[in-house]
Each structure stands twice: as C-alpha cells, then as structure tokens.
C-alpha cells in the first residue's frame, strides 16, 4: 500500500519530503491501540487478471484534529485515485465516504489542504461543495520542520529570564 502514498507525493512534486516508511504506516494505522489515522480504500478488479483479485486504485486517509472553536474535527490528509481510474466517480465516492465518517465521528468540520497549482483538485473539491478558506478568510499554512523546531528551542534556551510555562 505504501506505493500509492509515494505516487501522490510524486504527483505533488514533493517526493523528496517523504520521511515515513511502510513500517511506520503499519504501526501508526494498524498496531497502535488508538490508530492515528483511518484509511478508506477503493479497489477494482482487472477483467483480464480476475485470479489476482481486486487491487487498490485509490484511497482517502484522514485523522482527527482539534479546533477550540468547533471541537473535534477531521483532517483529510490524502485523497488519491490512480490516473487510469480518474473521472469515473471514485474520488467523489471516497470524499463522500469521508464526509459520512466525519459526521459519524461527531466532527462538524472536514478540513484539507491543496497545493495552489493543483487547479483540477481545487475544482474537484469546489464541485463537491468545499470552500476555499484562503480566499474566504485569508488562511495561510505554517509549518515547522525538525530543524526549525530545534533552532527555536535552542534560541529560547539562550534567552535569559524567559517566563516559565506550566
Ligand atoms: C482529485 C481526484 C481525487 C478526483 O478523483 P476522480 O475519481 O477523478 O473524480 P470523480 O470522477 O469522482 O469526479 C467527481 C466530480 O468532480 C469533477 N472533477 C473531477 N476532476 C475534475 C477536474 N480536474 N476539474 C474539474 N472538475 C473535476 C467531475 O467532473 C465530477 O463532477 P460530476 O459528478 O458533476 O461529474 C483525482 O483526480 C486525483 O487523484 N488527482 C490526483 C491527486 C490529487 O490531486 N489529490 C488531491 C490532493 S489534495
């Protein structure tokens, strides 16, 4: 299954940022007492290779986030359909199933991020009723990578008299 995660990273031109491993995914999604994500999968059977059984052609991976304003919410981390299976309604089925999961878990919000050049996906989400919050409210995504975190922490340690946290 790990190969489809890599396919999406390659599609997004960010394959060099993949740090996770198949083992990490197995542990976090299937072995933790409280799995860190849920993954809905779409499978299809190849007419010519029936004996091989259905194969994975798309997936939607989501996990909880928490909003102080809305409470528990769901974040759609990945939605991916293999190129030859696109335009057949699989993506909208995966998104609808995620919407059902979201409401069944008591989450009033489904959130996701999409790259600004990925206009097909932006159009897809908008055709499904999703709102573009960058346009509507001006949100921007901020991220700290491990080096940024370490730099911040060591800078703070150098500052004398910082207020303590409880
Ligand atoms: C985005 C993606 C998941 C859509 O999946 P899909 O199976 O091709 O989409 P569907 O066939 O279910 O299409 C659903 C609806 O969206 C519309 N849609 C799909 N792709 C579209 C596009 N490129 N532009 C505009 N509308 C689009 C379809 O017309 C359809 O509308 P309809 O129901 O009125 O006919 C798929 O194209 C994909 O995996 N893309 C590459 C990865 C990606 O960008 N993922 C999102 C990262 S945030």
Image (cartoon, helix red, strand yellow):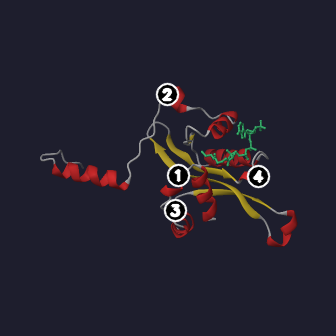
Q: CA distance from mark 2 to mark 1?
A: 27 Å
Helix, strand or loop for disc 4: helix
Q: Earlier in the sequence, mark 2 or mark 1?
A: 1
Residue plotted at (38% across, 48% down): 144
Residue plotted at (87% across, 63% down): 47
Q: Compared with residue 123, is residue 35 higher up or lower down, i.e. above or below? A: below
Residue, disc 2: 137
- Classify the position of ligand 1 by quadrant: top left, top right, bottom left or bottom right: top right
Q: Nearer the viewer, residue 77 or 6?
A: 6
Residue, disc 1: 14
Q: Residue furthest top?
A: 136
Residue 35 image point, x, y percent: 53, 62
Circle 3 or circle 2, nearest the eye: 2
Q: Earlier in the sequence, mark 4 or mark 1?
A: 1
Q: CA distance from mark 3 to mark 4?
A: 32 Å
Q: Earlier in the sequence, mark 2 or mark 4?
A: 4
Q: Earlier in the sequence, mark 3 or mark 4?
A: 3
Helix, strand or loop for disc 3: loop
Q: Nearer the viewer, residue 84 or 52?
A: 84
Q: Are marks 3 and 4 in contact (CB under 8 Å)?
A: no
Residue 43, which numbered label?
none
Residue plotted at (12% across, 46% down): 161
Q: Nearer the viewer, residue 134 or 14?
A: 14
Circle 3 or circle 4, nearest the eye: 4
Residue 34, which numbered label?
3
Q: Give left or right: position of 146 versus 130.
A: left
Q: Is mark 2 within 8 Å of ligand 1?
A: no
Residue plotted at (23% across, 53% down): 154
Sort mark 4 into few (<14), some (14-19) or many (20+) by Cα contacts within 10 Å. few
Residue 85, which numbered label?
4
Q: What count of labels does the image hold? A: 4
Residue 141 image point, x, y percent: 45, 40
């Amino acid at each position: 299954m790990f190969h489809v995660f890599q396919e999406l990273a390659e599609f997004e031109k960010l394959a060099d940022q993949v740090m996770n491993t198949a083992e990490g995914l197995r542990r976090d999604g299937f072995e933790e007492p409280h799995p860190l994500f849920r993954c809905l999968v779409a499978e299809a059977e190849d007419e010519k290779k029936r004996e091989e059984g259905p194969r994975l052609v798309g997936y939607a991976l989501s996990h909880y986030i928490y909003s102080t304003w809305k409470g528990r919410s769901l974040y759609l981390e990945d939605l991916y359909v293999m190129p030859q299976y696109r335009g057949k309604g699989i993506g909208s089925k995966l998104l609808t199933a995620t919407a059902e999961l979201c409401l069944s878990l008591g989450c009033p919000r489904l959130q996701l991020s999409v790259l600004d050049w990925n206009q097909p996906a932006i159009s897809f989400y908008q055709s499904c009723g999703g709102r573009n919050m960058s346009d509507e409210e001006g949100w921007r995504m901020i991220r700290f990578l491990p080096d940024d975190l370490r730099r911040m922490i060591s800078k703070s340690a150098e500052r004398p008299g910082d207020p303590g946290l409880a």
